[in-house]
Image (cartoon, rainbow, N blue to C red):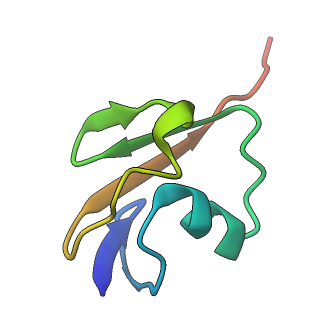
Amino acid sequence: MEILLNGAKTVVQENNIFDLMQRINQNADGIAVAVNEEVIPKTEWKSFTINENDSILMITATQGG
C-alpha cells in the first residue's frame, strides 16, 4: 500500500506503526507518531492499523541549547 511518510510517498507492506518502525530500523525512544494529524500513543502502535493513503509523521525529540 502507499502512504505518505514524513511527506514522501512510500510503499509499505506493514499494517501497523510498530512494524513500520521495525522496518525502517527506527528506535522508538524519543519518537512521536501522528497519523492523519492525530497523535498515536506508543501503547497503541502495535494495534493501530495503517491504511492506504495515510499521512504518517514521525518526529524525533532532540536536545538543544
Residue at the far top: name it.
65
Name the side, left or right, on which 7 lies relative to 60: left
Residue at image position (38%, 51%) is 48
Q: Residue at x 33, y 60 (%)?
A: 49
Task: Judge whether 20 appears above or below 44 on screen.
Answer: below
Total marks in image = 0
Measuring from the top left, give residue 44's x and y in whole percent: 47, 39
Residue 36 located left or right of residue 14: left
In the picture provided, is 15 more to the left or to the right than 2? right
- State the residue lying farthest toward the front: 47
Identify whether 28 is placed above or below 12. above
> Is the residue 62 above or below the residue 5 in the image?
above
Q: Residue at x 67, y 29 (%)?
A: 61
Which residue occupies the foreground of this view, 62 or 57?
57
Percent coordinates x, y for residue 42 in the rendering: 56, 34
- Image height of 39 relative to 45, above or below: above
Quadrant into which the C terminus falls: top right
Residue 62: x, y in percent? 74, 28
Residue name at image x 55 percent, y 33 percent: 43
Tell me which corner region of the image, top left, top right, bottom left or bottom right, holds residue 59: top right
Q: Residue 45: image x %, image y %? A: 51, 46
- Asked if one can make out residue 53 in the rendered structure from this viewpoint, the answer is yes
